[in-house]
Image: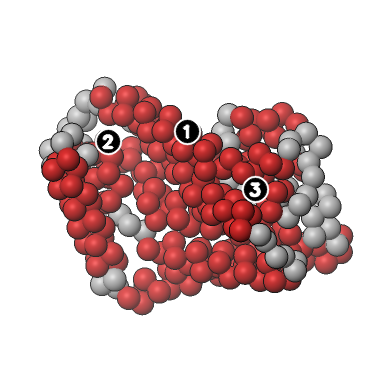
Amino acid sequence: MSFSSWVRGTRLYFHMVAASIRAQMQYRYGFFMNILGWAMSYAGTAVTMWVMLYSFQSLEGWSFWQLIFLFALAVLSWGVCVIFFFHFRSLDQYILNGTFDRFLVRPIHPFFHFMAMKFDVGAFGQLLFSIAAVTLAYIQLGLDWPFWKWGVFTSAVIGGTLIQGGILVLISAIAFWTTRSERFYWVVMFPAKSMMNYPLSLYPRAIQWVVTFILPFAFVNYLPALLLLDKPHPSFSSYWGAFSFAVGLVFFSICYQIWMMGLNRYKSAGS
């Protein structure tokens, strides 16, 4: 792709993002209720944690506010991920209906065209909750991070977005071979997201290794939280949390290449 084509494609991408936002803003009541609903849903999970720890005081050595930080860090990167990648889980519907073909005939890369199709601003509710929760946890825990820890935090947010986005891209790629993919979201992504709400040390050793070395969910929030909160783990070094961005970049690149392999074998299902 030439530089001029890349510039033109980038302009088209942001033009479609702006059109998506304007379309969602047409129904402002539903738009703001969607944001509020997301925020209240995650606030409910935080209340559940408080109720659980009211009697037990800690969970695997994690206090309430440490758990809130762990949870909010995952939600923060997931909120960014939802804005860009959440609709990838429904790619199979476009393939089945034959409407995916339109992404192949326009002057923008099909991947970025599909990504720009829906800019889910409703996820701002998740960002609202997670930013507030991280801020409160930071204050309640009396944290005073040096500059490098803020770098680790930023790296965790970006890396977590790439890891979770990569999973959604990988799930969507299955549709190129099977024409069905959304069910894998409920089998893989949904349970993994629920698992990330709590310390990884709660789970069997085999699961810990899978979500660290195969599907690297541990780099989304758990390993960075160990480093940021100065907490130990019996098997993993907390300094692994500093590599969230690198792991996310490599993992997303692999998922993207698999998606492109699927795209290259795509055959229209008709309309």
Residue 211, given in percent of the width and then of the height, sits at: 63, 35
- Residue located 53% across and 36% down the image: 247
- Looking at this view, is 61 or 198 the one in front? 61
Residue pictured at 33% horizontal, 37% vertical? 92
The quarter of the rendered structure image containing the N terminus is top left
Residue lying at the far front in this picture: please name it.
Answer: 147
Residue 188 place in picture, x, y as percent: 54, 38
The residue pinned by badge 3 equals: 224
Classify 10 Å Cα crowding around label 1: few (below 14), some (14-19), many (20 and above). some
Work out whether residue 175 or residue 138 is closer to the camera in this orientation and state it. Answer: 138
Label 2 vs label 1: CA separation?
A: 30 Å
Q: Which mark is residue 96?
A: 2
- Tell me the amino acid under the disc marked 1: Val
Discs 2/1, front: 1
User: In the image, which disc is placed on residue 132?
Assistant: none
Within-10-Å neighbours for mark 2: few <14, some 14–19, many 20+: some
Q: Amino acid at mark 3?
A: Pro
Taking the view exactly as shown, the residue that stands out farthest to the top is 265
Q: Which residue is mark 1?
A: 250
Corner quadrant of residue 50: bottom right
Compare marks 2 and 1 and give the one earlier in the sequence.
2
Label 3 and label 2: CA atoms lie apart by 40 Å
- Image quarter (top left, top right, bottom left or bottom right) of the C terminus: top left
Compare marks 3 and 2 and give the one earlier in the sequence.
2
Q: Amino acid at mark 2?
A: Leu
Give the class, few, some or many, for how many residues have Cα within 10 Å of label 3's Cα (few <14, many ≥20): many
The residue tagged with tag 3: helix, strand or loop?
Answer: helix
Please report contact status of discs 3 and 2: CB closer than 8 Å, yes or no.
no
